[in-house]
Structure formats: C-alpha cells, structure tokens
Image (cartoon, rainbow, N blue to C red):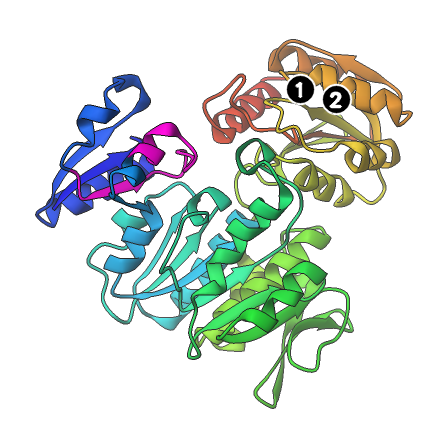
Amino acid sequence: MKVLVYGAGVSGKGVAEVLQKAGNDVLVYTDAMNSFATSVEGVDLLVLSPGVSPEKEEVRLALSRGIKVVPEIEVAFARCSGRMAAITGTNGKTTTTTLVGEMLKTLGVPVKVAGNIGLSLSKETEELSADAWVAAELSSFQLETVQNFAPTISCVLNLTPDHLERHHTLENYYRAKRNICLQQRENQFAVLNYDDANIRSWAYDLRCRVCYFSRRMELPEGVFIRDGSFVVAWDGKEEIVCSVKDMKIFGPHNEENVLAAIAVAYLAGCRVTDLAKVIKNFQPVEHRLEYVRTLDGVRYYNDSKATNTDSAVKALEAFPDGHVILIAGGHDKLTDLRDFMGTIKKFVDVLILLGEAKARFLAAAKAEGVKNIYLVDSYDEAVALARKVAKKPQVVLLSPACSSYDMFSCFEERGKKFKELVQAL
C-alpha cells in the first residue's frame, strides 16, 4: 500500500516509521515541499498529523481523488494489540494521563503513556502484547477526523472554549472531543465528568457503560468525594481510596483529575490500595503548577502548560488567598477574556503581559477594572520585573493563557526558559 503521511512532527515521523516497517511504501510530506499534487499521485492512504487541519486544500484534494484520509491515532488504534485508556478534555489531560499510567503499572503488565503528551501513539503502541495497557492523552486535533476509534476506556475531563482558531465554533470543538467515546461498544467504558452538564448528557447517546466522577456531589454510582476522601461506588460495592489531603498536587482542578484517574484505573482492574499509594506519591507534572523555588519568602511557579484561559483560571484558583504576580500572554487563541480577567481582578496583585496577545489582553484587563498592569517585551524583562515588585506573601506565577508559538517552539521550551531565569535570580 502506498501511504502519504502529512506532517513531520513526532506523530508523523512515528506513524511513518511504523507503516514503513510493516511493508508499506511511505512518503512524508510537509508544507515546505510545495508539491502535494505530485506527492499524492497513486496514494492509497493519507495519514494526517495532529497539526494538519482537515480543512486544508491539500486534504480536500486527496478526498476529491477518492483517497482515504485518517488521523495518526486511527492508525495507532488499528494496529494496537493491547488495551487503551484514552483521555481528553480542555485541561488536565497531561496530569491525568500521567497519573493513570502510574496507576496502570500496579497491574504488573506492560504500560505505555503516549499521544498528545509528546510521544507518537503509533510508535509507542507498536508490538504491544494483548495484556498491555496504553494511557493515551488525546487532543481535539487528534480526534476530529476519527472514524473507528474505540478505546477500552475513554475519559472526558472538562470542556471550555479553546482552539477556536482551528475549529471555528464551540460546537465543532466539542464534537471533536466527543469522538473519543462515540464508537465504543457495550463491553467498554466511558468516564465522564458529572459536574459538566454538557459532558453528562453524552451518556444518553453512548452504547458503552458510563462511569461518572464528581467533585461537587456524592453519586449513587461512580467516583466522588465524601467527608474529605475519594470514594468509589461501583457494581454495588463501595470503597474509600484515600484522603484528599494525601495529594501532593494541589487545587480543585487536580481533585477532579485524581477522581477521573481513579475511575479509569479502577475500571481497568487496579486495586484501591494500589491507587492510594500512587496518589500519595504522585508529584506535579513538569510545567503544570510546578514549584520552582522560594526567594525572599516569595514562591515561584511554572505553569507554562496553561495554554488557554480556563487553565490559567484554574491555576489562579489554586491560590485561594490570592496575592499573585501573574505573567501571561503569548500566541493569542482569540477566546473570550471576560471571565479570565474577572478572575485576575480577584486573585492578582500585579499583571505582567507579553507576547502577541498583550495588546488584546491589556484592553480586556482595563475593561474589567484590573489594576497594576505592566507590558514587557521578553521573559527576561518579565521575570526581572516580577522579582522587583514581589513581596512575601505574594507568589509569582507564569500561567500564560496562550500558546507559545509567538516566542517559543512549544510550552516546554517556554517553561524551561522561565525556570532558568528564576533559578538565576
């Protein structure tokens, strides 16, 4: 079979290698080549990397020629012999997927963690045994064109506006996320956030069994918090996992992430006692509310992974006493800023803005009555200014509410730059 892989990032390279090893004739195409019409001649299958929109002219050309078009995760799923726990949501995906991976390891079987977390799903799931598990972090980009994808367990954490520059409307964005569970069958499970009415309503259209999780209320069946402890109620059996206070990660959003991870891992067969041990030892994921250092009584946190406003709001709410010096801005996703600026007004003492989004962020901040706003041109300036104005008990928080592509290649590079600057103070 002749295959054209569109995109040469981690996912594209991984799926190209796997398909070539399986005996296919594989060519990798990037936009820099400017020869798509020629490259696609005689092709049987076009595989899209997550960064390639299905609306591109090249994709439409392939479809018009009758070429089958699938996303990289569809190839990974079709070739995966093991079982898959697939996790999506606007925020919390990396933390939850990493936590689920650690929990699955207690089963004593091979475990892989891959997908949007930075590793090619196709490559990581290659040659897995039938008893293996894959914890897969999936984005809306990866899910928007799936056709047969049906993981053993799906999990939807939350939904708030994001990636409108790609999906155009909230309906399109939510539809992409919903694809994670639409094809699941009766012997599979969907873990859904009961506290989100939109996600909760999806259960009525699913063939698989649904397990809800909730931070706000006790459920007759599902995973929830009662008297400060995580509780599992399933198939007529109720078990206490551990105290919420046992978590080393903090914030209400992380309580939700842990609830979801417990549900996924429990359905996969993990014992409650093992889940408790993992939760008690689980450290924050790099670039997600990551503690960097304390200097003159001021704590510094790297939350570079906050690439949208909702994620930044959750980070601010993790500091209920407020007094935050917030560094924000970057490549603008053009989402509404009103709620974000309302949260800033409540929790933030000083707002430092930079990047492409700073002018729009500044206007939105002023419109909501935010005070003490500074504009800077670089991270060197931002960190130096934060150091100058911050006094105990304030905290300095990098939580950009934007992607990193105006100044960096990825949020990891942005977070590492911030940490280097803070450590050098």
Q: What is the residue that sits farthest to the front in this orientation?
A: 64
Q: In the rendered view, tell whether residue 168 sits above or below residue 186.
A: above
In the picture of the structure, the residue carrying the numbered disc 1 is 357
> Which residue is rendered at x = 66% and y = 66% of the image?
200
Q: Is mark 2 on a helix, strand or loop?
A: helix
Q: In the rendered view, tell whether residue 394 sits above or below residue 422.
A: below
In the picture of the structure, the residue carrying the numbered disc 2 is 361
Verify whether residue 304 appears in magenta: no
Q: Quadrant of residue 2?
A: top left
Give residue 369's position: percent from left, percent from top: 91, 25
Q: Is mark 1 on a helix, strand or loop?
A: loop
Label 1 and label 2: CA atoms lie apart by 6 Å
Q: What stretch is highlighted in magenta?
A: 43-61
Taking depth in this image into account, of 168 and 294 the one nearest to the observer is 168
Callout 1: 10 Å neighbours few (<14), some, many (20+)?
Answer: many
> Which residue is rendered at x = 81% and y = 33% of the image?
338
Residue 394's mark? none
Q: In the rendered view, tell whether residue 331 sits above or below residue 105.
A: above
Q: Is residue 4 left or right of residue 144?
A: left
**Callout 1 amino acid:** Ala
Taking depth in this image into account, of 114 and 67 the one nearest to the observer is 67
Callout 2: 10 Å neighbours few (<14), some, many (20+)?
Answer: many
Give residue 425's position: percent from left, percent from top: 63, 17
Give residue 357's position: percent from left, percent from top: 66, 19
Counting labels gives 2
Q: In this view, does 367 lie to the left or right of 243?
A: right
Q: Are marks 1 and 2 in contact (CB under 8 Å)?
A: yes
> Which residue is rendered at x = 56% and y = 45% of the image?
172
